[in-house]
Image: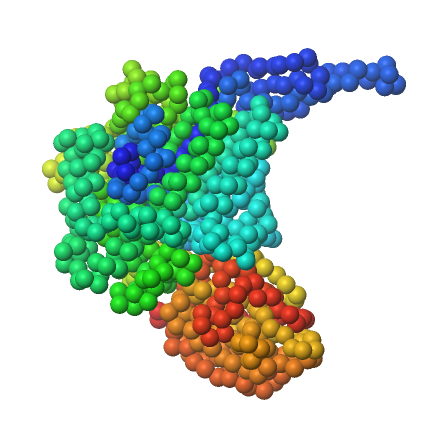
């Protein structure tokens, strides 16, 4: 188990108030009066309107009014606070999680899908991730039902169900379940939180985001509270927002239960704690002994706490990752810094979660609150590659940053100047005692998540351990049983497919402490790796590629290119002893079961490609367009709705009007500090050099190339940047020419360009720059750097992407 401090690891914290069994309709008040309420049987959502119960005659004075009763949940139904973070570790202080562990139960056999947005889709629907279109992250969605990143309307979310039953519903933090190609302000919005049953949304859309300058939305409107607000951080701002939301509901509608789905970005990269937390954790020297010693310490703590049974074995360190003792002094120094900042981010996130939980108590709700606090939506991440990175987008673009170069960012690691991730060795250590990491569903290092549950007066076996096998799809049925609400048969007239998880509520009874798990069978699949669990047995493929090695080479055949392993996890909970060679018949039985489950839950067709899927055509607002035209200002447009200039030739033409006295500011940009481009008029220094035409290309914060033109005088001007790619293929270079009013003013070459993605948390902006600037030293400016002239017309003309050798 990935253990945090004395309890264990953290990702979904779910808080639920009170519970009643599903029962007959409950009506309060006088029928037809304004104060009358009713529960519903929940079979049809929304419920059919009741027949008018009053009397209508020609005159109102002779008629009897009648109001339809307000729909409310069953008496005693819970508030729900579902907190999902990205936390792993073993020595990092997490008092908020410890508080819940000490007041309730610890679950040591709870599992995710091994990747973030698939787990999140499963946890809000109660169905397997392929069943709801999230067989993989949405950025590499493909046109198959299990992989299109669209949650089907016949598989409604917990938000939709609770909202129709009288709950106030909200979502704070990470939304990685809106299809990548539907994430712009043009919608459609049915797959945004507001369209999935959540009345209120405050958070970012996508896989990750800077916590200093996130792509933040309130409902479907982009907001920028961090501008001119030094020290602002989303972790704290999100807690403030959620606390205010709960307080407001308590004061306005004290009897109305709420669902707060609270999902901070922590601890997904970028690791962005405040300086105070970095100092606090660094001063504790938690990671100075290195990842091998940390692993041994965590495992010993797990056994001491009863989280791991005495017969559990610590799995071996992989030969593909370096031993700590083999590292140089520079490597150790850098890697300790990476881990300190990560640990600070985790501790900071837990502190803010603690504030939210404390707010529930301050509102008088903690005593009747069920809290489910899950550690991780996947295993610890090795996406920093072998050496870590100051900028996660180097990983996504297949660029490894040497250790010596990373020391350029060492003094401010974790600040807004970095988008950091730690070295892969830390990921393996933080998945102690298991093998493998995030992205790998075949082994528990990718899927096992610690979880704690407390509920005063209902859970009395305080501090005890529960070892039943469970999965994130079991969260929704657990909530529904606690609330006394049945699964709907229809939502908006659409017949619902049954929920696929099982309730965990039976484990709360002390008499069932050692009862067999009611979740008897569970498949796992991600990126071609796969496994099947049944009644204490696991059959799993041996991963054929390494998560920390990004490569363009073709993966093995997705069916025949994998070996299979077999484990009796009832006796061998860490998957230490492979029984495949000794028990071929049992292995064959389990393999057949996997493919039966795969057919049942939309897992087929299996696909182990990554780069090919990232680059696959999918529906979008830009598909097939050869010209894009803008004017004035436009901000917050995500990459999926912006003109794509990667791996191709293109022309940008800006027709601008400069006022008397000159102008400055951003004409158009995509990306920012960690990669992207910008066409702007320079700010200058001390009044010198203001208004020069500049096109700047930022290659992943590793190299910046600029084209500079003259200062523009008052009047109308036409600026053209024309880039010709030297050859087809990913990340190839080329020549760019900057022209002003028909005259070439600068010519420069790029040896390499960004091959895969600009920072996904940045946006395409016209007329200003809303997040981070593409310039660093030369031409530096402070966002929003509004253009002080007038943009009459801005045109992008990208050529089709030519195919070539990568």
Q: Quadrant of residue 35?
A: top right
Could you tell me which residue is drawn at 62 percent across and 83 percent down? 741
Assign the N terminus to one quadrant of the image. Answer: top left
Could you tell me which residue is drawn at 57 percent across and 39 percent down? 200
Could you tell me which residue is drawn at 30 percent across and 62 percent down? 551
Q: Quadrant of residue 603?
A: top left
Asked if 242 appears above or below 743 in the picture, the reply is above
Image coords of residue 58 (percent x, y): 88, 19
Q: Is residue 747 visible?
A: yes
Q: Is residue 454 left or right of residue 434?
A: right
Query: Front-most of 159 and 644?
Result: 159
Q: Quadrant of residue 739?
A: bottom right
Asked if 393 appears above or below 276 in the picture, the reply is below
Image coords of residue 751 (percent x, y): 38, 77
Q: Is residue 476 visible?
A: no
Image coords of residue 242 (percent x, y): 51, 38
Q: Is residue 647 left or right of residue 655?
A: left
Q: Is residue 30 left or right of residue 559?
A: right
Query: Front-most of 738 and 129?
Result: 738
Asked if 170 appears above or below 430 in the picture, the reply is above
Could you tell me which residue is drawn at 45 percent across and 72 percent down? 777
Furthest toward the right, the residue is 59
């Amino acid at each position: 188990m990935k253990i945090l401090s004395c309890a264990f690891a953290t990702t979904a914290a779910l808080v639920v108030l009170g519970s009643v069994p599903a029962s007959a309709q409950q009506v309060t008040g006088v029928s037809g009066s304004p104060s009358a309420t009713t529960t519903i049987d929940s079979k049809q959502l929304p419920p059919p309107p009741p027949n008018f119960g009053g009397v209508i005659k020609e005159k109102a004075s002779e008629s009897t009014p009648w109001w339809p009763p307000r729909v409310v949940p069953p008496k005693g139904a819970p508030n729900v606070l579902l907190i999902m973070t990205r936390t792993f570790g073993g020595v990092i202080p997490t008092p908020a999680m410890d508080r819940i562990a000490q007041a309730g139960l610890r679950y040591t056999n709870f599992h995710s899908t091994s990747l973030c947005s698939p787990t999140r889709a499963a946890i809000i629907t109660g169905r397997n991730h392929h069943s709801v279109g999230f067989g993989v992250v949405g950025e590499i969605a493909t046109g198959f039902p299990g992989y299109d990143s669209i949650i089907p309307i016949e598989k409604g979310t917990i938000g939709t169900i609770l909202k129709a039953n009288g709950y106030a519903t909200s979502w704070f933090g990470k939304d990685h379940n809106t299809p990548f190609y539907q994430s712009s302000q043009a919608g459609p919005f049915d797959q945004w939180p507001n369209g999935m049953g959540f009345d209120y949304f405050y958070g970012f859309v996508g896989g990750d985001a800077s916590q200093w300058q996130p792509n933040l939305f309130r409902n479907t409107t982009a907001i920028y509270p961090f501008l001119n607000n030094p020290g602002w951080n989303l972790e704290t701002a999100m807690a403030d927002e959620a606390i205010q939301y709960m307080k407001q509901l308590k004061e306005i509608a004290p009897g109305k239960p709420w669902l707060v789905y609270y999902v901070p970005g922590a601890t997904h990269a970028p690791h962005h704690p405040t300086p105070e937390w970095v100092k606090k954790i660094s001063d504790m020297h938690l990671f100075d002994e290195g990842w091998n010693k940390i692993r041994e310490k965590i495992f010993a703590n797990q056994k001491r706490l009863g989280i791991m049974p005495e017969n559990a074995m610590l799995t071996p360190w992989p030969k593909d990752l370096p031993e700590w003792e083999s590292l140089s002094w520079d490597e150790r120094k850098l890697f300790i810094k990476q881990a300190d900042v990560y640990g600070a981010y985790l501790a900071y996130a837990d502190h803010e979660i603690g504030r939210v939980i404390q707010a529930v108590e301050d509102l008088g709700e903690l005593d009747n609150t069920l809290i489910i606090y899950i550690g991780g939506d996947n295993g610890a991440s090795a996406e920093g590659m072998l050496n870590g990175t100051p900028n996660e987008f180097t990983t996504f673009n297949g660029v490894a940053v040497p250790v010596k170069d990373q020391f350029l960012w060492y003094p401010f690691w974790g600040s807004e100047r970095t988008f950091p991730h730690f070295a892969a060795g830390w990921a393996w250590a933080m998945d102690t005692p298991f093998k493998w990491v995030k992205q790998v569903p075949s082994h528990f290092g990718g899927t096992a998540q610690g979880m704690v549950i407390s509920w005063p007066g209902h859970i009395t076996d305080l501090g005890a351990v529960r070892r039943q096998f469970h999965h994130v799809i079991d969260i929704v049925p657990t909530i529904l049983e606690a609330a006394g609400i049945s699964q709907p048969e229809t939502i908006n007239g659409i017949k619902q497919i049954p929920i696929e998880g099982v309730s965990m509520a039976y484990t709360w009874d002390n008499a069932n402490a050692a009862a067999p798990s009611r979740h008897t069978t569970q498949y796992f699949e991600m990126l071609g790796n796969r496994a099947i669990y049944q009644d204490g047995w696991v059959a799993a493929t041996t991963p054929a590629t390494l998560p920390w090695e990004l490569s363009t080479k073709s993966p093995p055949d997705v069916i025949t290119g994998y070996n299979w392993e077999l484990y009796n996890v009832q006796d061998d909970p860490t998957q230490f002893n492979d029984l495949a060679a000794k028990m071929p018949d049992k292995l064959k039985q389990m393999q057949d079961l996997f493919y039966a489950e795969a057919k049942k839950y939309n897992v087929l067709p299996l696909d182990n490609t990554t780069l090919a899927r990232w680059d696959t055509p999918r529906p979008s607002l830009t598909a097939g367009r050869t010209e894009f035209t803008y004017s004035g200002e436009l901000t917050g447009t995500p990459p999926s709705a912006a003109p794509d200039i990667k791996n191709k030739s293109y022309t940008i033409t800006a027709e601008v009007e400069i006022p008397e006295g000159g102008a400055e500011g951003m004409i158009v940009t995509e990306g920012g500090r960690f990669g992207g481009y910008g066409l702007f008029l320079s700010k200058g220094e001390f009044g010198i050099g203001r208004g020069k035409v500049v096109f700047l290309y930022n290659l992943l914060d590793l190299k910046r190339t600029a084209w500079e033109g003259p200062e523009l005088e008052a009047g109308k001007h036409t600026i053209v940047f024309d880039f010709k790619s030297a050859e087809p293929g990913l990340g190839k270079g080329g020549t760019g020419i900057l022209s002003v009013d028909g005259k070439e003013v600068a010519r420069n070459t790029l040896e390499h360009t960004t091959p895969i993605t600009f920072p996904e948390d940045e946006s395409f902006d016209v007329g200003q720059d809303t997040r981070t600037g593409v310039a660093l030293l030369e031409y530096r400016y402070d966002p929003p750097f509004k253009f002080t002239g007038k943009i009459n017309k801005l045109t992008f003309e990208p050529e089709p992407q030519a195919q070539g050798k990568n």
